[in-house]
Amino acid sequence: MKYLEIILLSVITVACTQKIKKVTLNGNVYYTCSMHPQVMEPNPGNCPICGMELIPVQKSKGPKPGEILLSDQQIQLGNIHSDTIRNGAIGNKLVLTATLNFDAMKTTSVSTRITGRIEKLYYKNIGDYVSKGSLLIELYSEELNNAKQEYLLAVERQKVLDNSQIDFRQLIESAKNKLLLWGMTESQISGLTKKDQGGLTTSIYSSGAGYITELNAREGDYLMEGGSILKLADLSNLWAEAQVYTSELATINRYATATVQLPDQPEKQIKGKIEFVNPEINSSTRINLIRVNVPNPGNLLKPGMPAYVTIENPASSSLVLPIDAVIRNQDMVLVWVQTGINTFKSKMVVTGLESENQVQILSGLKEGDVVVTRGAYLLQSENIFRNGNSPGMSGHDMSTM
């Protein structure tokens, strides 16, 4: 009899236990680990990974597809902070490496206007300063000497035959214009009638002023018409030629203020204007070139000096976030948005200008969204841990793109 009672009691106990388990399995609560949320058990107990006590979670309050639900302890340990996105002022600052160079708009090329041989060259060193009107060369030219004789002959005939019907003034003017076009000055032509001004060579004077950057002739050289003697550069203004990557071109404002700073003189800052942006991209380096006009009082700056060019775009009002809130990879730009209590969802955004600690949001968010400003990379890592190394586009909200 006792044996039957024991068996009956055991059957009742097992039935009750099965009934309790059935209620628990179909309940609205499951148990998870605060450190390993992938663990989900129907009954209380300890985590099979770390041994911590499992905590209850309401199924009705669980995350929607694409969302991540974290416990209070996870948020605290991950130092995750959220803030409401709002309008703010942002302007970007771009620092470029540059080299000082001659201003091509202030360079002069001095050349011969007639064929001849250089008998004497007065400037022989690159870097010498040449003032306007300085004597450059003594040129021997048969064609120029013949034109001189034509002019002198017309002057002599005017003196002898002044009362004739021939207008020698027109002949003299024609011969004089030819000499002027070939590089002689008014004073040189006036002196041809003096005996001490005669000679087989003609003095050629500089038509510009500046420092010699190229010396293309030597004594004894035979120059053709238009042959270059030297090139001069005025150093009162220089160009700071800066290199810009293609990806940075869109952030440069042609009318923005540019500041030029020299590594050897960090305390000296020179304001300049962007004069030119090269429309052609170097196909091998993907680098563009911009030129900033730099005033050079006293000619203290020299071509070839290294420099830094800082371009600051004016601040504009826009949606802004801390730069740490934005996650970039090769496919997209993401932020994490808080959708509920301890619940987060990633969104794709389009960014614009960037400063040292802020980034402009062009689309993907609206004012009033609560965005994770600290700990976004931890959320991204947790998302990859739960969904795999290549979650792809799943879970990314593109509704506001």
Image (cartoon, rainbow, N blue to C red):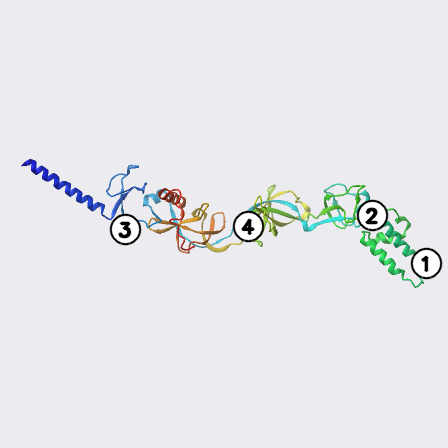
Q: Earlier in the sequence, mark 1 or mark 4?
A: 1
Asked whether, in this view, residue 12 is left or right of residue 227, the answer is left
Q: Quadrant of the C terminus?
A: bottom left
CA gap, disc 3 to disc 4? 50 Å
Q: Nearer the viewer, residue 206 or 180?
A: 180
Which residue is tagged 3? 60
Looking at the rendered structure, the kind of residue marked 1 is: Val
Q: Are marks 1 and 4 in contact (CB under 8 Å)?
A: no
**Closer to the camera: disc 4 or disc 2?**
4
Instruction: Kindly identify which residue carries mark 1.
Output: 160
Q: In the displayed image of the protein, which residue is found farthest to the bottom?
A: 165
| Residue type pointed to by label 3 | Ser
SS at circle 2: strand
Q: CA distance from mark 4 to mark 2?
A: 51 Å
The residue carrying mark 2 is: 203
Residue 392 at x, y = what percent?
40, 46
Return the disc, 2 or 1, that comes first in the chain's sequence. Answer: 1
Whether residues under marks 3 and 2 lie with C-beta atoms below 8 angstroms apart, the answer is no
Residue type at numbered disc 4: Leu
Residue 61 in percent (x, y) is at 29, 50
| Residue that sits furthest to the left in the current view | 1
